[in-house]
Amino acid sequence: MWVCVVRDGIKRCAFIISLIVAVLFTSSFAVAERAFDKAKMDQYLHSLADNNKATLSVVFTEKGQVTYSKQTVLPKGAIMAFKGNQQYKVGSITKTFTSVLVFQQIEQGKLTLSTPLSDFYPNIKNAEKITIGQLLSHRSGIFNYTNAPEFNAYFAQYQDKKELLARIASYEPVFEPDASYEYSNSNYALLGYILEDVTGKSYTRLVQDNIISPLDLKETKYCAEEADCGKALKSFYFYQGHWNLMPQWSMSVANSAGAVLSTPYDLTRFIRALFHGELISHQSLAMMKGIKNTTSKGLFKLPFYTKSSYGHRGKIESFLSDVSYFDADDVALSVTVDALNHNFNDILVAVLSIYFDRPFELPDFDRKPISLAIAQLKKYEGTFTTPSVDVEIKVFVQDGMLMMQAAGQAPLPAEPYSLYEFEYKPAGILCKFAKTKEGGVDYTQFTLHQVDWILPYSKQ
């Protein structure tokens, strides 16, 4: 079956669970030394800009020191003037800020994970059964207001607390509290309002006093209470050979679920401080991380080959963002995008591969699918498994195409782009077969890439 997750109002479906710019600027921050191919990283970022794939900012820090920092700007063919502003709307990364603020109140005894929503907003359906912990973990069953058809009619209009609360209260539950998991911006909008209720302070003041000022995040701001906040920040989408200006939200609509503005440098400072006990206790951090992603509270675990990180991603307008922390390496990464015509996950995999010195070939954006003889395709056939998930994949040839199929699921055709790479673009699946020492194809191993997953498979 397909597994779908809704993030920031965008529904992303992954088959992997069931199948399982023109100009580069160097940051002025002091840069620590690390042995990785910086020229290759620069070349990759240049290629994204030069081929109208993305303009973005990338910052790596290690042990608190910047090891890489670059920004690409000026999307080619942009309809509107673009000034290369370094600040970005970071969308749902705001939820990690909100979770930190909630745990700070828990540590002060003003809230608990079992505090019912009915203590604050009894008019929300099932409020007496919904807890703070379930709101944090997206297990409340409250409908995501950004998924409603009428959202497109008001996303650009200023919304006050009364209006947004009334909208959230009007929807029927998606499921009974704690019976399932579904990402919902409504959960974190409510958490922001609860924080204001228990502290008597605005969310703006809370995030400023409890996170931004203590960490000296000079380029970070929360501004949902200002009607024109963020209007100077532009994002673009690519259509008919041109970059076009994306319609802008009112940040009041995103509020405590997505209204933070920041830079990659500030985000790496924030995520490292969180893991180093500067904001909440290690006990609270463990609860934020959770046992698995469907029980986590403001952080998600993301695998990368033998490594893993914790962080969050965000999408608002055409801005996309990621902040991740590799605890074992004391490495923080943030990537923020303002113009995208490419798979964001592929960009993250690329910069991480270069940074951690994993094999990575610079993409050929002009490449097209190739034709392979049936005799060649049959060499890839077999049954493959991975220790990461209990999902077996059968690879076989049918009607002249290489098919990938999970047990009990429909087969998917994978197009060859080289002897090593096969893609099923509708689901964003990339299957990369390994190379032998001599440079040939190792038909016994492949790595499956999709959305947040990078899974190594071996033939049985």
Image (tube, rainbow, N blue to C red):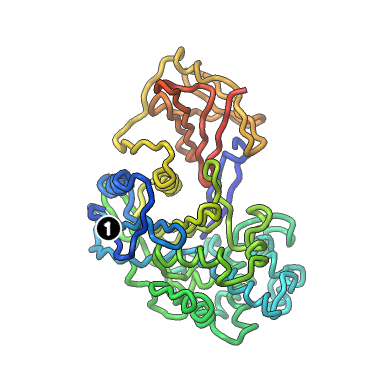
Q: In terms of depth relative to the viewer, which is nearer, 217 or 437?
A: 437
Percent position of residue 77, x then y: 23, 53
**Which residue in the rendered view is the most extreme toward the top?**
375
SS at circle 1? strand
Tell me the residue at 63%/70% (across/down): 281
Instruction: Determine if residue 52 is in view.
Output: no
Q: Residue at x 49, y 37 (%)?
A: 429
Residue at 71% over, 73% down? 117
Position of residue 205 measured from the top left corner of the image (x, y, whole percent): 51, 83
| Location of residue 232 by image quarter | bottom left
Q: Amino acid at mark 1?
A: Val
Q: Position of residue 303 (x, y in %)?
A: 55, 46
Up the image or down, 358 lies above or below 130; here it is above
Pointer 1 local density, CA inside 10 Å: few below 14, some 14–19, many at least 20:
many
Indicate the quadrant where residue 23 lies.
Answer: bottom left
- In x, y percent, where is residue 103? 64, 72
Check the picture and name the quadrant holding the C terminus. top right
Image point (31%, 43%), residue name: 40
